[in-house]
Image: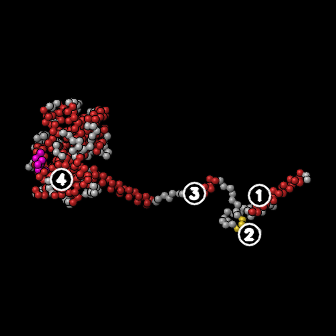
Amino acid sequence: MSQKKIKERKHKNKSIDENINNREFGLDISNINKKEIKYPKKEVKYPKKGKLNNICIYPKEKSISYDKKIKKRNPKKKLNKPSKSKIDLIIKTVNKINDIDSDNQKNRDNNNEIYNLNPIGEYEREIMNYLYQEETINRANYSIFPNMEKNCNIIFLSYLKRFSFINLFISFQRELLLRQETLYLSINLFDRYIQNIFLENKISEDLNKIALTCLFIASKYEEIYPPYLKEFLDIFKNKYNKEDIFSKENDILSSLDFQILIISPILFLKKFCLEEKSENEEKEIMNLCFNGAQFFLELCIIEPKFCELKPSLQASICLYLSRKFLLNCSNGKVWTYKLFFKTNYSEIDIKKYIKIALKTIKNFFGNIYTKNFMAMPLYIKYDSPDYSRVSFELKKKFINE
């Protein structure tokens, strides 16, 4: 056979194979050119049966890239924007929540308020037992005062006028809006550091700088959002630098072995007054009584003999005096059974040490410590409406006006 015939046969065999393959898919395009092929429309969803042998005819799809197929299968979801009415409702609800939170925060910032609810009522006994056990930790030794008067230097002579330094701490507290716990902790750090200096026979540069650094340490320990150091320095009109205070802070903490934790009498006072206010309907009278006890506590810290007592006993004595002078009740109702079980102190135990507190109060209102007690920061602090003007009302009791 010639080569031309061989090529013609091969060409025929290819065309036959193609026709067979196309018949399998239901098409016979042996006599049709490729350009004249008309594909069925895309609207056909289901296969149609052909005339020959019931063969199903499927529409032929165009070639589509892989990325476009994925986009068709998983189209992007359009976010439905909320309407203006829904946005206004959301804003109103958020504003209400913020208003409630701001009111609660204002009430918590006021230290003179006691809360009706007691969220830790289940664990209160365990907490109180722990406080009674640990109340004598990290306290100053106030029995050294007689020895300090005998062997006094220029520094210790000015320290013996503790009333002026306590008023200085109170003025700092008012300007920087600090808590009551920071005040008691700063006084404790100040007393302990100076007593260590006295025992080691060291001479310090300036007591005002020590007082400022003690308040700076206490604010960092007790406050949630402590003030910046610039605010402390502005009180003394930038008399001291940052380096001076940081160096003094290292000296104080190293001398105290980094033992800062104390249990102050104000903590016991809040625990004692919590149950009284929650059960009594006369809230204003009980707030006034609580503020009076705070005033007596800050005033009686001047006396070293009073500071030698336990913090729980200090708080109970001041609460007894405030109830006696402000509630105007008989002697039988001043100290109730509930307070006896709450404080673990009877009225007889309190009357043993009450003379020390009464003496300091009478000396304050008698202008023995100063020429004019009404100009002192302690009196001005409690003459404000935040503390229900307790100092003004107690002045009427002790001075016949």
Residue bearing the label numbered 3: 75
Q: Nearer the viewer, mark 1 or mark 4?
A: 4
Residue at image x 14%, y 31%? Answer: 151
Where's residue 3, x and y in %?
89, 51
Q: Amino acid at mark 3?
A: Pro
Residue at image x 26%, y 52%? Answer: 127
Q: Which residues are magenta?
A: 350-356
Mark linked to residue 35: 1
- Tag 3–tag 2 contact (CB < 8 Å): no
- Tag 1–tag 2 contact (CB < 8 Å): no
Residue at image x 13%, y 56%? Answer: 334
Looking at the image, is mark 1 or mark 4 earlier in the sequence?
Answer: 1
Looking at the image, is mark 1 or mark 2 earlier in the sequence?
Answer: 1
Where's residue 139, x and y in %?
21, 41
In-image side of 186 versus 145 (left or right): right
Residue bearing the label numbered 2: 54
Mark 3: secondary structure: loop
Task: Look at the picture and state if 152 lies above or below 131.
Answer: above
Is residue 322 visible in the rendered image? The answer is: no
- Determine the CA span between mark 3 and mark 4: 74 Å
Q: Amino acid at mark 1?
A: Lys
Residue bearing the label numbered 4: 344
- To which quarter of the image does residue 201 belong? top left
Residue at image x 22%, y 30%? Answer: 202
- To which quarter of the image does residue 90 belong? bottom left
Can residue 375 be found in the magenta stretch? no
Looking at the image, is mark 2 or mark 4 earlier in the sequence?
Answer: 2
Q: How many marks?
A: 4
Where's residue 369, x and y in %?
13, 40
